[in-house]
Structures are given as C-alpha cells and as structure tokens.
Image: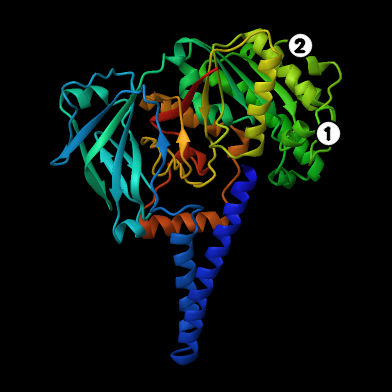
Amino acid sequence: MQNRKQQLLKQHRRQKRISMLVIVAFVLLLTLFVKWWLLPVGLLVAWLIHETWFADHLFYAPSEDYRYRFPESAPSWQLEVAHGWLKLPDNAEITPESTLILEIQLKTGILGRLFDPLVHVGDDQQVFERGAQGVRYLNLTGQAQELQEQGLHIKGEYCQLASSAKLVAFNVLNPAAQRLMILAPHADDAELAAFGLYSQAREVSIVTLTQGEIEAEYYQRLGLSSEQAATLKGRLRAWDSMAIPLWGGVPQSQCVQLGYYCLQLPQMAKQPEQDFASRESGEVDIRTVRQHNPFALPGDTDGRPNWTNLIADLRACLEHYQPDIVVLPHPELDPHADHIATGQAFFQAVQQSVYKPSGLLLYANHLHDNDRWPMGNANTGVALPPAMIELSTDQLYCYVLSAQQQIDKAQALLMQHDLQTPLTLKRRLRRLVQRWLTGRQWPKTGDNEFLRKAVRRHELFWYRKL
C-alpha cells in the first residue's frame, strides 16, 4: 500500500510538471512576441497559480463517487432535502449516541473548482475537494436530537446538493465504557487519532512501538551530529509517549514504550530474527528508552530490535492489560509503512496470546489519496474520507469532542516534539497565498498541519469484531 501511494505521488508530480510547463511556455511566448516585462510578471502569476491550485496532493479524479459498502444490518432511511432543511422520517429511530452518516450527491461549478466546496449542516460545516462531483458522505454524529426534533438546516457553498439523501445509523456499544488499548506506531499517533476518546475512557493503555527518531535535522542546530540528533529526538519522542497521555488522564503505569526504530518495522517483518538498527542514530539496543515502562517485557532480556521480540512484547502487553477493544491503524486506508506493520504485528501477537480482545477500532492518520483529509478548518466535523476503491466496513464509530476537549487535544499535540518544528519559508508563503486567494484558514493554536486536521469535533473509527 505504501508503494501505491508512491506511484500516485509520482503520477501527480508528473501531471503537475506538465501543467506548469504549459503555463511557463505560454508566458515565454508572450514575452517573445509582446513585452519583455511580461516574463517576471508571468512567472509570478505561474507561481501563484501553482501554490494556490496545484500544491494539494490529490491523487484521484474529484468527479468520481466515493464508494462505501455499509452492512445491510445498519438501519437506513431516505431523507428529503426540502427548502434547505433535512427532515427525518417519522419511522426513524436514532439515539443521541448513534453514529450518523449522510450519503448525498454533490455537484460543483466553476467556483467549486477555485474554492473549497463546503456543506453547512446544522451547527457544523464539512469540506470536500475542489471540483467534487458525485456521492459524498457527511457526518451528522452529535446532531441526532436536533435532527429528530426540528430537522437540520443544510446548504452547499460553492456546490449544489441533491434533493434527496440516505441516512445510515451505526450503534456500536460505547467503547469508552470498555477497556481500551491504543497501539501507536509513533509517539503522536494515539493523540492524533483518539485523544478525545481515551481521555474519557473507563480504562485505557497506550503502547507505542517506535522511538520515532528519524528526520532529526532540526536538532542539529544545537551543534549535534546527525547520529546525536537522531538519538536526542528518539529520547524526546519516547518521553512524549510516556508523559503526554497524563494530560488526558492516562497515568504512566498505563503507558508502554517498546523502543523499536522508525521505518524499520516492515523490514523486521520480512526477516523476524534479524536485528534492524536505527537508520539515523545507529543504535541497536531498544532498552535505552524503556527505563520508564511499568513492567518487564520479553525484549528487555537482550534489547534486540527484531520482529520476534516485537511480537513477544505485544503479546505481553495484551496479556497484562487485557483490553476489550484495541485501537490501531486501518490496514486499507492508512498507507504509512510503520502503521501497516503495526497491524501485522498485532494480529501475529493475538494468534500467540492466551488473551483475545473482542473488537478493533481502526483509525487513519494518513491517506493514500488525499493529504489534506480531513479537509476544511479545525474544530469542524469530519466527513468520511475518499474511498475510490470500494471499501466495506462492519460498523462506524464516531466520538464527539466537546469544545473543551478540542482545546485539550490541541494542547496535547503542541506538547509533541515532532509537531513543534517551525514551518519552512516555502510553506509559510504557500499558506499566505492560499489564505489571500482562496480563503483557507489555519488554527491559531499552532502551525503544524495536524492541528488543522486532527483537532475536530469528531474522531472517526471503523469498528470490527475479532
């Protein structure tokens, strides 16, 4: 799946280069046959066009339908959109806790290709890709009472909505009332995906698989070598994984750092007995960041960074914490290599364990096809992500965050060392251009893109029984 995203990225860059070459060629022709001063002006205009409309990583045709196949057991109803209102049929039975997904046809015109099309629904707004056409899925979770009592006001901006829609309800048993274990490939994944959920859970454990020590150039400004910078970053992010959950009410006794090395998990899976040292620090002993773990693990014996130790460590965590539900990356939606390997390791550990969880909550902190998802502004709702290849799902579960929880989640992310690196000048200029020309906004809490994408009123999960 990581290979698929790399192929899509290459295709996107190739198409972008062709488009920009056509624009530059046009500018040069104007310069040769009209006025010389058109060259600098034309190049500036070409750069503005690129930064405004070609900088997004969108690896699919926005004119395609999203393709979800929901279970037949999930109750659904046809709804009419009349005079800007969404009304629930009299026979519909939903609860305030229901996860509610609205399937609706959406169409954009010229303005919807220049600006981000959005749908106002109730007290929320949800954004889709420029030029969107076809089936899309709005998330109405948290607005069940208003929908039942008086209906929800719904309106498209830079887009038009069909006059009918389909509402699907999911009623997953409240995960926050059960024992949860969150598997985080890296130190910030638990907070990105599930801070709101885990901060309210009855009992939760967080197991982080890697130190996350790579891409440590920022720390070389301290006069460190590349190896020393990677070591420092690994120590800092390992500390993050143990300390930051306390902000969400999870004590250190419920947090485990396994200390394996970033982007080495896929290679470990292929050669289970082979040790894989850090690519950047050169370290080969995972025990250097395990000193704060609350109990001994099998890998503590020799500290070898191999797949066999990883499976044994995960099995020990499962049998120690005995979770009802395990929260981990979605194997079809999230293409990050370490995220895919985390799922593979978990399933092998379950096979060897005497304890079996009852279900999974799957999350996607990255996507194959759209690097901006969730699209739109921070503190708004999360529509379903693009699924251009049909995606079947057992159930959906959406946790709704209060305004205070969203503030707390933003602060938890701001504590993460990997999300504190300043924006490059290129990214700052791109944001300014997009703000001026298309009205895009970024939150005041901080510059990192995850503060826009992850701090929302919804945390979305796919539920599967084991």
The kind of secondary structure element at disc 1 is loop
Residue drawn at x 54%, y 34% as measured from the top left: 414
The kind of secondary structure element at disc 2 is loop
Dot 1 amino acid type: Glu
Residue drawn at x 27%, y 19% as measured from the top left: 94
The outermost residue toward the bottom is: 33
Q: Can residue 224 be seen in this view?
A: no
Residue 112 at x, y percent in the picture: 32, 56
Report the coloring of the rendering.
rainbow
Residue drawn at x 77%, y 26% as measured from the top left: 307
Q: Is residue 462 left or right of residue 133?
A: right
Q: Earlier in the sequence, mark 1 or mark 2?
A: 1
Dot 2 amino acid type: Ala
10 Å neighbourhood of mark 2: few (<14), some, or many (≥20)?
Answer: few
Q: Is residue 71 left or right of residue 125?
A: right
Q: Nearer the viewer, residue 246 or 75?
A: 75
In the picture, the quarter occupied by the N terminus is top right
Q: Specify the quadrant of the image occupied by residue 292.
A: top right
Q: Name the residue under label 1.
A: 283
Q: Mark 2 points at which residue?
A: 296
Residue 76 at x, y percent in the picture: 29, 27
In the picture, the quarter occupied by the C terminus is top right
Indicate whether 149 appears above or below 448: above
Q: Which of 129 and 259 is in front in this view?
A: 129
Circles 1, 2 touching at the beta carbon (< 8 Å):
no
Residue drawn at x 47%, y 21% as measured from the top left: 197
Indicate whether 269 appears above or below 132: above
The outermost residue toward the left is: 83
Q: Specify the quadrant of the image occupied by residue 237.
A: top right
